[in-house]
Image: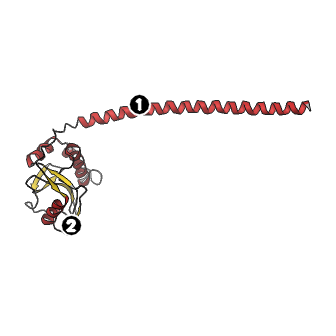
Protein backbone atom coordinates (compact mmCIF):
# COMPACT_ATOMS: atom_id res chain seq x y z
CA UNK A 1 0.00 0.00 0.00
CA UNK A 2 2.81 2.37 0.86
CA UNK A 3 4.51 1.47 -2.35
CA UNK A 4 1.28 2.22 -4.28
CA UNK A 5 0.85 5.59 -2.55
CA UNK A 6 4.46 6.44 -3.26
CA UNK A 7 3.97 5.60 -6.95
CA UNK A 8 0.83 7.79 -7.11
CA UNK A 9 2.68 10.59 -5.34
CA UNK A 10 5.63 10.27 -7.72
CA UNK A 11 3.29 10.20 -10.70
CA UNK A 12 1.41 13.32 -9.51
CA UNK A 13 4.70 15.06 -8.74
CA UNK A 14 5.96 14.39 -12.31
CA UNK A 15 2.69 15.65 -13.78
CA UNK A 16 2.78 18.81 -11.65
CA UNK A 17 6.43 19.35 -12.50
CA UNK A 18 5.62 18.80 -16.18
CA UNK A 19 2.65 21.22 -16.03
CA UNK A 20 4.72 23.70 -14.12
CA UNK A 21 7.42 23.48 -16.78
CA UNK A 22 4.84 23.91 -19.55
CA UNK A 23 3.34 26.91 -17.75
CA UNK A 24 6.78 28.48 -17.51
CA UNK A 25 7.37 27.75 -21.20
CA UNK A 26 4.02 29.32 -22.19
CA UNK A 27 4.72 32.34 -19.97
CA UNK A 28 8.12 32.72 -21.63
CA UNK A 29 6.52 32.49 -25.09
CA UNK A 30 3.85 35.03 -24.06
CA UNK A 31 6.56 37.46 -22.91
CA UNK A 32 8.42 36.95 -26.20
CA UNK A 33 5.25 37.69 -28.19
CA UNK A 34 4.60 40.84 -26.16
CA UNK A 35 8.14 42.02 -26.90
CA UNK A 36 7.68 41.28 -30.62
CA UNK A 37 4.36 43.17 -30.64
CA UNK A 38 5.98 46.17 -28.95
CA UNK A 39 8.82 46.10 -31.51
CA UNK A 40 6.31 45.95 -34.39
CA UNK A 41 4.35 48.87 -32.94
CA UNK A 42 7.56 50.90 -32.73
CA UNK A 43 8.37 49.95 -36.32
CA UNK A 44 4.82 50.88 -37.45
CA UNK A 45 5.14 54.26 -35.76
CA UNK A 46 8.40 54.81 -37.62
CA UNK A 47 6.85 53.78 -40.94
CA UNK A 48 3.85 56.07 -40.36
CA UNK A 49 6.26 58.96 -39.77
CA UNK A 50 8.22 58.09 -42.92
CA UNK A 51 4.99 58.05 -44.93
CA UNK A 52 3.93 61.44 -43.54
CA UNK A 53 7.37 62.85 -44.32
CA UNK A 54 7.25 61.44 -47.86
CA UNK A 55 3.82 63.01 -48.46
CA UNK A 56 5.12 66.36 -47.21
CA UNK A 57 8.05 66.07 -49.62
CA UNK A 58 5.63 65.82 -52.54
CA UNK A 59 5.74 69.59 -52.33
CA UNK A 60 2.07 70.06 -53.11
CA UNK A 61 0.94 73.65 -53.54
CA UNK A 62 -1.42 75.26 -51.07
CA UNK A 63 -4.98 74.03 -51.42
CA UNK A 64 -6.90 75.51 -54.35
CA UNK A 65 -9.26 78.42 -54.09
CA UNK A 66 -12.72 76.90 -54.42
CA UNK A 67 -14.96 79.11 -56.51
CA UNK A 68 -18.13 77.08 -56.85
CA UNK A 69 -19.78 73.73 -56.50
CA UNK A 70 -21.73 71.30 -58.62
CA UNK A 71 -24.37 68.82 -57.53
CA UNK A 72 -24.42 65.19 -58.68
CA UNK A 73 -27.38 65.77 -61.03
CA UNK A 74 -25.80 68.82 -62.65
CA UNK A 75 -22.50 66.95 -63.10
CA UNK A 76 -24.30 63.97 -64.64
CA UNK A 77 -26.24 66.29 -67.00
CA UNK A 78 -23.03 68.06 -68.07
CA UNK A 79 -21.27 64.76 -68.78
CA UNK A 80 -24.27 63.50 -70.77
CA UNK A 81 -24.34 66.72 -72.79
CA UNK A 82 -20.60 66.83 -73.49
CA UNK A 83 -19.82 63.11 -73.83
CA UNK A 84 -23.14 61.48 -74.64
CA UNK A 85 -25.78 59.69 -72.57
CA UNK A 86 -24.81 56.21 -73.75
CA UNK A 87 -21.43 56.31 -71.99
CA UNK A 88 -20.79 55.16 -68.44
CA UNK A 89 -20.36 57.62 -65.57
CA UNK A 90 -19.53 56.53 -62.03
CA UNK A 91 -20.08 59.55 -59.80
CA UNK A 92 -19.32 58.89 -56.14
CA UNK A 93 -20.32 62.07 -54.30
CA UNK A 94 -23.38 64.31 -54.08
CA UNK A 95 -21.43 67.60 -54.25
CA UNK A 96 -18.22 68.44 -56.14
CA UNK A 97 -16.24 71.65 -55.75
CA UNK A 98 -15.00 73.80 -58.61
CA UNK A 99 -11.83 75.80 -59.08
CA UNK A 100 -10.25 77.77 -61.89
CA UNK A 101 -8.11 76.51 -64.75
CA UNK A 102 -5.18 78.54 -63.38
CA UNK A 103 -5.44 76.74 -60.02
CA UNK A 104 -5.42 73.38 -61.79
CA UNK A 105 -2.38 74.42 -63.85
CA UNK A 106 -0.64 75.46 -60.62
CA UNK A 107 -1.31 71.99 -59.20
CA UNK A 108 -0.01 70.29 -62.36
CA UNK A 109 3.22 72.30 -62.18
CA UNK A 110 3.90 70.99 -58.66
CA UNK A 111 2.79 67.43 -59.30
CA UNK A 112 5.47 64.94 -60.31
CA UNK A 113 3.31 62.25 -61.98
CA UNK A 114 4.42 63.32 -65.45
CA UNK A 115 8.08 62.67 -64.52
CA UNK A 116 7.55 58.92 -64.14
CA UNK A 117 8.89 56.65 -66.86
CA UNK A 118 6.31 54.96 -69.06
CA UNK A 119 6.58 51.15 -68.84
CA UNK A 120 4.13 49.20 -71.04
CA UNK A 121 1.61 47.15 -69.05
CA UNK A 122 3.34 48.11 -65.80
CA UNK A 123 3.27 51.89 -65.52
CA UNK A 124 1.22 53.00 -68.47
CA UNK A 125 -1.72 55.32 -69.09
CA UNK A 126 -4.05 53.92 -66.43
CA UNK A 127 -1.38 54.08 -63.70
CA UNK A 128 -0.57 57.67 -64.71
CA UNK A 129 -4.25 58.65 -64.46
CA UNK A 130 -4.77 56.83 -61.14
CA UNK A 131 -1.67 58.47 -59.71
CA UNK A 132 -2.72 61.98 -60.77
CA UNK A 133 -6.21 61.47 -59.33
CA UNK A 134 -4.68 60.27 -56.06
CA UNK A 135 -2.46 63.35 -55.82
CA UNK A 136 -5.39 65.61 -56.69
CA UNK A 137 -7.52 63.97 -54.02
CA UNK A 138 -4.76 64.46 -51.45
CA UNK A 139 -4.32 68.07 -52.59
CA UNK A 140 -7.91 69.22 -52.79
CA UNK A 141 -10.46 66.53 -51.98
CA UNK A 142 -13.75 66.62 -53.80
CA UNK A 143 -12.94 68.68 -56.87
CA UNK A 144 -14.82 67.84 -60.06
CA UNK A 145 -11.84 65.75 -61.18
CA UNK A 146 -11.76 62.19 -62.40
CA UNK A 147 -10.37 59.42 -64.54
CA UNK A 148 -11.64 58.87 -68.06
CA UNK A 149 -11.19 56.08 -70.59
CA UNK A 150 -11.53 55.98 -74.32
CA UNK A 151 -11.41 52.69 -76.21
CA UNK A 152 -7.59 52.74 -76.11
CA UNK A 153 -6.40 55.22 -73.48
CA UNK A 154 -6.83 56.39 -69.88
CA UNK A 155 -6.43 60.05 -68.85
CA UNK A 156 -7.95 62.59 -66.46
CA UNK A 157 -10.75 65.11 -66.73
CA UNK A 158 -11.59 68.24 -64.79
CA UNK A 159 -14.57 70.61 -64.69
CA UNK A 160 -13.62 74.22 -64.03
CA UNK A 161 -15.55 76.99 -62.28
CA UNK A 162 -17.03 78.03 -65.65
CA UNK A 163 -18.43 74.49 -65.92
CA UNK A 164 -16.26 73.59 -68.88
CA UNK A 165 -14.94 70.05 -69.26
CA UNK A 166 -11.16 69.75 -69.61
CA UNK A 167 -8.93 66.83 -70.57
CA UNK A 168 -5.64 66.41 -68.71
CA UNK A 169 -2.98 64.13 -70.12
CA UNK A 170 -1.21 62.95 -66.94
CA UNK A 171 1.91 61.81 -68.83
CA UNK A 172 2.67 65.34 -70.05
CA UNK A 173 0.47 67.68 -67.93
CA UNK A 174 -1.07 69.04 -71.16
CA UNK A 175 -4.60 70.33 -70.70
CA UNK A 176 -7.28 71.31 -73.24
CA UNK A 177 -11.01 71.85 -73.34
CA UNK A 178 -12.85 68.66 -74.25
CA UNK A 179 -13.91 68.56 -77.89
CA UNK A 180 -11.30 71.03 -79.16
CA UNK A 181 -8.76 68.31 -80.02
CA UNK A 182 -9.91 65.69 -82.50
CA UNK A 183 -8.16 62.53 -81.39
CA UNK A 184 -9.83 59.14 -80.97
CA UNK A 185 -7.60 58.42 -77.97
CA UNK A 186 -9.51 61.10 -76.03
CA UNK A 187 -13.09 60.25 -77.00
CA UNK A 188 -14.49 59.47 -73.57
CA UNK A 189 -16.36 56.19 -73.04
CA UNK A 190 -16.23 55.94 -69.24
CA UNK A 191 -15.68 58.33 -66.31
CA UNK A 192 -15.01 57.74 -62.61
CA UNK A 193 -15.29 60.72 -60.29
* Quadrant of the image containing the N terminus: top right
Measured as percent of width and height from the top left, residue 175 is found at: 11, 52
Measured as percent of width and height from the top left, residue 33 is found at: 53, 33
Q: Nearer the viewer, residue 14 or 53?
A: 14
Callout 2 environment at 10 Å: few (<14), some (14 to 19), or many (20+)?
A: few
Measured as percent of width and height from the top left, residue 154 is found at: 22, 57
Report which residue position mark 2 lands on: 87
**Element under disc 2:** loop
Q: How many marks?
A: 2
Estimate the spatial distance between the alpha carbons at disc 2 and disc 1, rounded to whole Å. Answer: 49 Å
Residue farthest to the bottom, as pictured: 86
Height in image: 165 above or below 41?
below
**Element under disc 1:** helix
The earlier-in-sequence mark between 2 and 1 is: 1
Residue 140 location, quadrant: top left
User: Which of the numbered marks, if any, corresponds to residue 141?
Assistant: none
Q: Nearer the viewer, residue 182 or 144?
A: 144
Q: Nearer the viewer, residue 179 or 16?
A: 16
Residue farthest to the right, as pictured: 1
* Quadrant of the image containing the C terminus: bottom left
Report which residue position mark 1 lands on: 42
Residue depicted at 26% across the width and 37% down the height? 55
Left or right of 18 in this view: 126: left
User: Tell me, what colour scheme is on the image?
Assistant: secondary structure
Residue depicted at 25% across the width and 56% down the height? 92
Residue 162 location, quadrant: bottom left
Measured as percent of width and height from the top left, residue 189 is found at: 20, 64
Amino acid sequence: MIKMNFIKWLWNWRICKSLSGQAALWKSRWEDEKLKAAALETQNTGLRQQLEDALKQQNLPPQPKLTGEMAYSELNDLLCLKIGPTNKFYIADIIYYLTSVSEMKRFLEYNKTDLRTYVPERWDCDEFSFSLMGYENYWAGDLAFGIAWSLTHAFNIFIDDQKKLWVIEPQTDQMWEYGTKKDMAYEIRMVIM
